[in-house]
Image: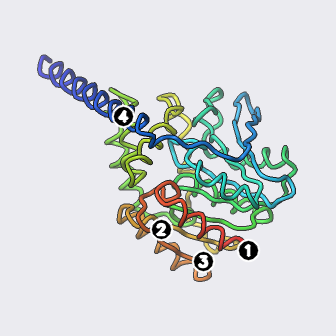
Amino acid sequence: MLTLVVLVSVIKIYYIMEDSKFKSEYEQMKRDGFMNYENKTNIGHKTLTLNENTIHYYISGEQSNPAILFLHPAFSDHTCFYKQVDYFSQEFRVITIDLIGHGLSKVRNNKDKIDKSTEHIIEILNAENIDKLHIVGVSMGSLIAQHFALKHPDKTLSLTSLGGYNINRTDKRVENSQRKEQLGWIIRVIFSMDSFRKYLGTVSAFKKEEQIKYFESAQGFSRKSFTIMTDLSKLIEDRPNPLRNYPLLILAGEKDIDLSKQMAEIWHLAEPDSKFHYIEQAGHCANMDNPDSFNETVYNTIK
């Protein structure tokens, strides 16, 4: 018993020291101006209440322009697209969302899980009188984007996936990798959410300033938010020959882990008319690490 108490105390001290060091680096980068970025575009902040849950979303660009929706990765929020909003708002109606349990979209009714996001998106489109749109998803956001396109191909102008994999094919390698990753999260989450958020930044972005930006974007994800993530697996199942009548662009960061890149390439090979592209000098969230290349690649595909 004493040994266990000592071990727990040592782990707790470790995370306190780790958090203190990181926060010092974070404050220094803010003072040095690395974190100074303000969108030039006027961004409207709106809400939608469904089943007691309030979903926050953000919209910019001319109402008459074609719509494009960006869906963020797990644990982050809409701010991870801060370098896409200005670029795409020049010619598109840009929508970003804090998915349920993320950012300002706090968990109120636990009956709604992350798999309900497709329904939330439909309600937002109805509220904004948008019939069709281009949809771009990063990591978990790409799974939701695929699910939306699967359920509503008539509303999908194009689908872009970054750091994702095909939800229409189950794969044990992905399941095993995710299981191992989740085990590593548990201790961090128990002792320090900031340590967990910092870790997410290091595995999601390649550049130090973007790692810290990701850390910032994960502040709205709480321990309670984990309750809505349990149904994410419901989006993934073997579906032979799913209907797709829209362009598909599959992207991966050059610096992402090997498994993520392999799954993107396998998906591309299974979709012979899809387009595939690596974003250089970028990690899992390549839209943050190399926004110029990401923005240009997506734009050239959907225009």
Marks 3/4: CA–CA distance: 43 Å
Residue 115, compared with residue 187, is above or below; it is below
Looking at the image, is mark 3 or mark 1 earlier in the sequence? 1
Q: Residue furthest front?
A: 32
Q: Amino acid at mark 4?
A: Gln
Q: Horizontal and vertical percent for residue 118? A: 70, 50
Marks 4/2: CA–CA distance: 29 Å
Nearer-the-camera pick, 173 or 87: 87
Residue 299, compared with residue 4, is above or below; it is below
In this rendering, the count of numbered labels is 4
Q: Quadrant of the N terminus?
A: top left
Q: Nearer the viewer, mark 2 or mark 1?
A: 2
Q: Horizontal and vertical percent for residue 75? A: 50, 41
Residue 113, compared with residue 3, is above or below; it is below
Looking at the image, is mark 3 or mark 4 earlier in the sequence? 4
- For mark 1, what is the residue? 245
Q: Amino acid at mark 3?
A: Ser
Disc number at residue 274?
Answer: 3
Density class for disc 4 (Cα within 10 Å; few <14, some 14-19, many ≥20) is few
